[in-house]
Image: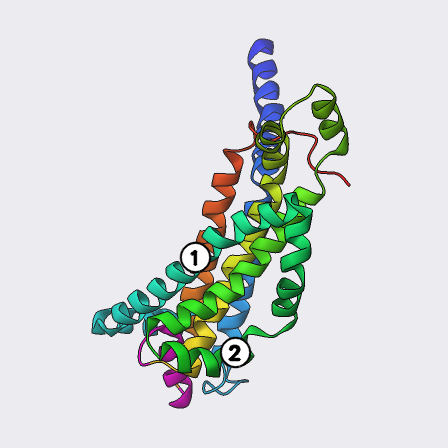
Amino acid sequence: MATAEIELDAGASAHPSTLARFYREHERSIIGGGTLLAVLLIWEGVARSGLVDPLFLSSPIQIVKAGIDLFEGGEIWTHIQVSGSEFLLGYALSVAIGIPLGLATGWYRRLSYLLGPFIDALNAVPRLTLMPIIVIWFGIGIWSKAVVAFLGAVLPILIATNSGVRTSEARYLQVARSFSASELKIFTSIILPGTVPFIFTGLKYGIGRALLGVVVGELYAATAGLGYMIGEAGDTFQTSVVFFGVLIFTATGLVSVGVLDALERRFETWRPKAGAAS
C-alpha cells in the first residue's frame, strides 16, 4: 500500500515537470499561437457585433469564404502565377547581383569607392518614384514588376553583405596573415563564413521589399497579378477579397523567411561561432 502511494506521488510530481518542459520547449509557438487566436476571435467578434461597417472591415470567416470562392472560380490561379513569376524573377536577380557585389565592395576598397556613390544615391531614392520610367522602358508586363522587385531587394542584400565583410573579426585576419595565408584562403576561410549571418539578414529583409515592389507595381500598371486583383477589389468595395490578397502576400513572406531560417541553420557548423566584430 505504501509503495503504491509513493508511486502515485512520484507520478503526480513528474506530471507538472513534463508539462513545464513541454511549455519551455514550445513557449514561442504557444504564446504566438495563443495571441494570434485571441486577435482573430476579437476581430470576428467586432465584425459580427456591427460596430464597424462591413464595407470597411471584413471578418476572418468572410475572408476565408472569399478565398474559397476565388479558388473555385479559378481566376486567382492566373493572378498567383503572374505575381509569383514577378517575385521570383526580381528576387533571384537581386540575390545573384546583390551578394557577389556586396562581397566585392566589402573586400576591395577601391571598388567600394567607385560604386559607393551610386549605391548611396540609389538607396536614397524611393524606388517607387521610378515606376513611370520603368513602365516606359519595360511596359506593363511581368518584367516591369520584376525590375521593381529587384530594385527593392538588391540594396538590402548588397548593403548587409558589404557590412558583413567590413566587420569581420580583425584577430582572425591578423593571425591568418601572420601565417602567410593567401588572400583567397583568408576570404574563403574567414570572410565568407563570417558574413553568412549578414547575408541571410539581407535576404530576409529583401523578401519583404521584393513583395512590396510586386504589389505596388501591379497597383500602378498591370492587367493581372494579386496586386492588380487587390486594386480591382478595392475599387469595387470587395473588402474580403482585399484582405485575402493581403493574406496571400503575408503567407508568402512568412514561408519564404521560414525557408531561409532553415537554410541558415545548415550553415551553423561552417561559420565561426564568434560571429562578426568591428
Q: Is residue 205 above or below residue 146?
A: above
Disc 2 marks which amino acid? Answer: Leu
Q: Is residue 235 above or below residue 267?
A: below
CA separation, marks 1 and 2? 18 Å
Label 1 neighbourhood size at 10 Å, few (<14), some (14-19), many (20+)? some
| Element at label 2 | helix
Q: Which residues are magenta?
A: 223-237
- Which residue is depicted at the point 37% across and 73% down? 226
Q: Quadrant of the C terminus?
A: top right
Which picture quadrant has residue 126? bottom right
- Which residue is depicted at the point 68% across and 35% down? 275
- Which residue is disc 2 drawn over? 130
Give whichever of 84, 9 is nearer the camera: 84
Q: Position of residue 22 (x, y in %)?
A: 56, 34
Q: Is residue 180 above or below residue 261?
A: above
Q: Position of residue 259 (x, y in %)?
A: 45, 46
- Which residue is depicted at the point 53% across and 66% down? 152
Q: Is residue 158 visible?
A: yes
